Image (spheres, rainbow, N blue to C red):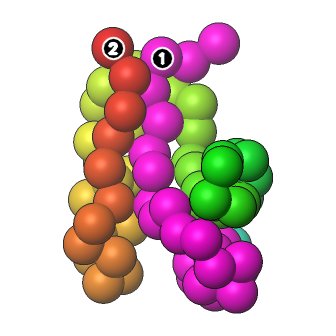
Amino acid sequence: MGKYKIIVETTGQKNSAQQRYNVMTRNKINADIKTYKTEGGELYSVEVGPYSGKKQVLKDVDNIKSLGITNAFITGA
């Protein structure tokens, strides 16, 4: 399993997450929408990865940011 992933967006609005997911897939970036249950409702996280190497995750986060999604960030070791 990879140790890195890219968080593209986390939101409480399913439509917003779906729009970000659509941007990823239109640009041939393999993304998923994860749903997290909280006391305040559901959160939707658009995530890319996992990655085992740092070089590829850094390249892909730069690619995502070049699409105008400047809040994307890397999580992991």
Figure check: 55 above or below 13 = above
Q: Position of residue 26 (x, y in %)?
A: 65, 82
Quarter-of-image position of residue 31: bottom right
Please give the residue where the numbered disc 2 appears in the rendered image.
Answer: 77
Q: Position of residue 58 (x, y in %)?
A: 28, 42
Quarter-of-image position of residue 74: top left
Q: Residue at x 62, y 59 (%)?
A: 40
> Is residue 42 rendered to the left or right of residue 65?
right
Numbered badge on residue 3? 1
Q: Residue at x 51, y 28 (%)?
A: 51
Under circle 1, the secondary element is loop
Q: In this view of the protein, which residue sits in the foreground, 72 or 13?
A: 13
> Mark 2 to mark 1: distance in Å?
6 Å
- Image quarter hosting the N terminus: top right
Contact between marks 2 and 1 (CB within 8 A): the answer is: yes
Q: Residue at x 34, y 76 (%)?
A: 69
Figure check: 39 above or below 67 = above
> Is residue 61 rendered to the left or right of residue 21?
left
Under circle 2, the secondary element is loop
> Is residue 6 rendered to the left or right of residue 11?
left
Q: Which residues are magenta?
A: 1-23
